[in-house]
Image (tube, helix red, strand yellow):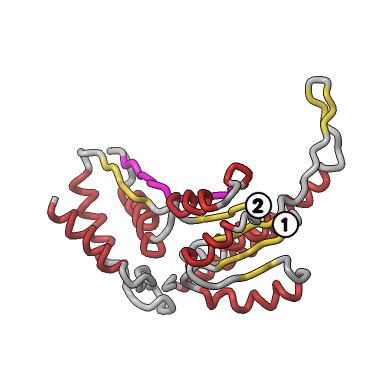
Amino acid sequence: IGKNLPDSQKEFDRTVEYIEDTIEEYKQIDRDAAKFEKHDGVYAHIRRGPLGVVLCLGPYNYPLNETFALLIPALIMGNTAIFKPAKYGVLLITPLLEAFQSSFPKGVVNVVFGRGRTLASPIMETGRIDVLALIGNSKSANALQDSHPRANRLRLVLGLEAKNPAIVLPDADLDLTIDECIAGTLSFNGQRCTALKIVYVHEDILEEFNKRFSEKVDGLKFGNPWDDGVKLTPLPEVDKPEYIQGLIDDALSK
């Protein structure tokens, strides 16, 4: 997918930490499940159990971390899962297939490969999916929910798009602020739902901010993701360069 080496290593480490943290959280939930709690004179006992079949659809920009963020909680709580890897970065999943096969009973983790539009919708249309776990965009989420014959009974775990702003005040430390804005906008080429989409800068420092921000961007190294010091890497989607050029042309025209 073109993610540079440090970010790829960071994603791997974060995924391992996430799995370990999720397991520890489950242990705490399990311990709490043995207790009765008293609220307003009423004793209550919370019992948790599997919901059924979970369809897990993760994004290509974090093919390891976001995928496991959906898959691991579902499996730990005793659900069965149908997991469709994202359209890019599929080879990353290959070494994990053997681990799934040796660690879980047959039929617990089911992996299907292909385009989401041709696979996910027919699966939802069967009505046999109890939980849709999706990290993507709201358009896809709405379409998949609508394709379920009992959409009112469908549970949803969704992580969708966002418009994340930064606000730069006149007393800001510009060196620190620009570094943070560069990281926020251009980490993994900005292909993140948490990326900064718009930066609001106070008019008193606007000219200086733009000058220094532009210089910083111009200094970023472009190259292959495995090269040292590379910050900007090739884009995995064929149509994205043309789309980005369109954004640039639109900005220049204004």
User: Distance between the Cα atoms at labels 1 and 2?
Assistant: 10 Å
The structure residue drawn at horizontal position 22% and vertical position 61%, both measured from the top left corner, is 246
Relative to 136, is 239 above or below?
Answer: below
Side of 57 relative to 219 (left or right) = right
> Residue 193, located in which quarter of the rendered image?
bottom left
> Residue 174: image x %, image y %?
30, 48
In which quadrant of the rendered view does residue 237 lie? bottom left
Secondary structure, mark 1, is: loop
Taking 92 as reference, is 215 left or right? left
Quarter the N terminus occupies: bottom left
Camera-side residue of 137 and 112: 112
The answer to whether residue 82 is seen in the rendering is yes
Q: Nearer the viewer, mark 1 or mark 2?
A: 2
Residue at the location (61% across, 62% down)?
68
Q: Which mark is residue 79?
A: 1
* Whole-percent x, y for residue 226 in the image: 44, 78
Q: Tag 2: residue type?
A: Asp
Tell me which segment is drawn in magenta. 156-168
Q: Which residue is mark 2?
A: 130
* Mark 1 and mark 2 residues within 8 Å of each other at the beta carbon: yes
Residue 75, image x and y in percent? 71, 59
Where is residue 50? Give x, y as percent. Answer: 75, 51
Q: Is residue 10 visible?
A: no
Q: Nearer the viewer, residue 90 or 129?
A: 129
